[in-house]
Image (spheres, grey):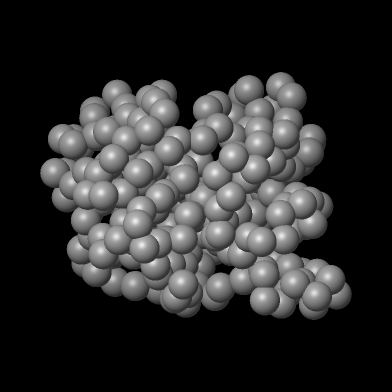
Amino acid sequence: MNIQLIRHATHIITFQGKKILLDPMFSEKDTLAPVPNAPNQHLNNPLSELTIEKGKLTQVDAIIVTHTHRDHFDDEAILQLAKNLPLFCQPEDEEYIKDKGFKHVVAIDQEYIWEGIKFIRTPGKHGKGELAEKMGPVSGFILKAEQEPVLYIIGDSVWYSEIEDIFRKYAPQIAVAFAGEARFLVGEPITMGLKDIDSMAASFPEATIIVSHMESWNHCLLTRDEVLAYRKENGYESRILVPENGEILVF
């Protein structure tokens, strides 16, 4: 398995010989308005450039969309991607994605097997309390196949009991944490931050954690340097990976 961080939540995962594009966001730097009622209102999104040409990003075998917020599935990606590619999503997003022209949308309620890969949809909470309700439904996905480590794409979620239960049930060797500690001007963070990463690392020492979803959207405040400093202070250099945009991790 290879995992390449493209930018923010967008990754290319090579799994069981298939190239899977995760949460495609193709907009050029500074072309989208900032998230309202959030920090850094003077910054347009995305904050970073794409690390791969769009043409190469479209040369994949399938797509996963964890949810349809514009930093995970934007208009530019919708325009560029082939509409006959298998696209795996949560049931709540099926009609929206079909309305965008995609012909092979697979809304996974629980499990689905494609080309020898088992996809298991998992829950998430995009924040806490009423804010999480306002943010709408989000999902993660477990990927399992012979000859591959168990991969857990957590999605846009904070750390809570159901995420912990998923780790216990499926024992993923690799977990992709969408961190960044995204937040609004009022309320708690709506994605993972250092406290969440610490809980995960302390509770499940057998898992390698990939921390992404940073430094590309105006309301994401956690930086790579902060995660790297935390990693060093706690002796997690081999267990917590903090890829740069474009970097490929090989497992």
User: Is residue 50 visible to us here?
Assistant: no
Instruction: Answer left or right for 34 relative to 229.
Output: left
In this orientation, does residue 85 appear?
A: yes
Q: Position of residue 136 (x, y in %)?
A: 55, 26
Q: Position of residue 193 (x, y in %)?
A: 74, 53
Residue 106 lies, in percent from the top left, at 27, 33
The residue under the point 77% across, 52% down is 203
| Residue 172 left/right relative to 51 | right
Residue 133 placement, left or right of 151: right
Count how many numbered circles sit on residues in the image: 0
Specify the quadrant that holds the N terminus: bottom left
Q: In which quarter of the view is residue 230 placed?
A: bottom right
Side (left or right) of 192 relative to 210: right
- Viewer-proximal residue, 43 or 221? 221
Q: On screen, 124 above or below 171?
A: above
Point out residue 173 in the picture as x, y percentages from the top left corner.
Answer: 56, 59
Q: Residue at x 67, y 68 (%)?
A: 240
* Residue positioned most to the front: 146
Picture residue at 43% right of the left edge, 38% below the top: 120
Q: Is residue 224 above or below residue 108?
A: below
Q: Residue at x 69, y 41 (%)?
A: 164
Q: Quadrant of residue 242?
A: bottom right
